[in-house]
Amino acid sequence: TCPSETSSIQTFNFPLNSQSWQVNGNAAISTSSVILAGSEIDQSGSIFYKTSYNLLSIAFSISFSFRIESNSQGYGIAFVIGTSTTSL
């Protein structure tokens, strides 16, 4: 969840509204998950929520689950808090 500047709670549930998210690279939004990269080599991807929040003036918490498939060519995940809503 991510509280907005007016202290309301923002919750993201699947299926995600794909119009609210910036999808980059090989990433894809399905009805029940986000796939950042497929099982082939040289793939990468990211998603960003398009609405920004002023994190200096609010408190927030987040929780999420992720899975790395055993047939992946690379492993890793990053949770990024930043000023850009379009790229990493």
Image (cartoon, rainbow, N blue to C red):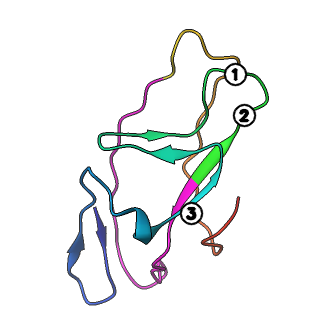
Residue lying at the far top of the rendered structure:
70
Dot 3 falls on a residue whose secondary structure is: loop
On the rendered structure, is 78 left or right of 30? right
Name the residue located 59 percent from the left edge and 10 percent from the top edge: 71
Q: Would you say residue 27 sits in the magenta stretch?
A: no
| Quadrant housing residue 42 | top right
Amino acid identity at mark 3? Ile
**Amino acid type of the residue that numbered disc 2 sits on in the rendered structure:** Gln
The residue at 33%/63% (across/down) is 17
Residue identified by numbered label 3:
81
Magenta part of the chain: 47-67
Please identify the dominant SS of the magenta region. loop
Drawn side of residue 23 relative to residue 18, left or right: right
C-alpha separation, residue under disc 1 versus residue under disc 3: 28 Å
2 or 42: nearer the viewer = 42
What is the distance, in whole Å, between disc 1 and disc 2 at their CAs? 7 Å
Q: Distance from label 2 to label 3 (Cα)?
A: 22 Å
Would you say the residues marked 2 and 3 are in contact, meaning their CB atoms lie under 8 Å apart? Answer: no
Question: Mark 3 packing: few (<14 Cα in 10 Å), some, or many (20+)?
Answer: few
Instruction: Read off the residue under disc 1.
Output: 40
Q: Amino acid at mark 1?
A: Glu
In the picture provided, is 12 more to the left or to the right than 37?
left
Residue 43: image tag: 2
- From what the image shows, is residue 81 above or below residue 36? below
Image vertical order of residue 11 relative to residue 59, above or below:
above
Q: Position of residue 83 (x, y in %)?
A: 63, 75
In the rendered image, which quarter contains the C terminus?
bottom right
Q: Earlier in the sequence, mark 2 or mark 3?
A: 2
Label 2 near label 1: C-beta < 8 Å? yes
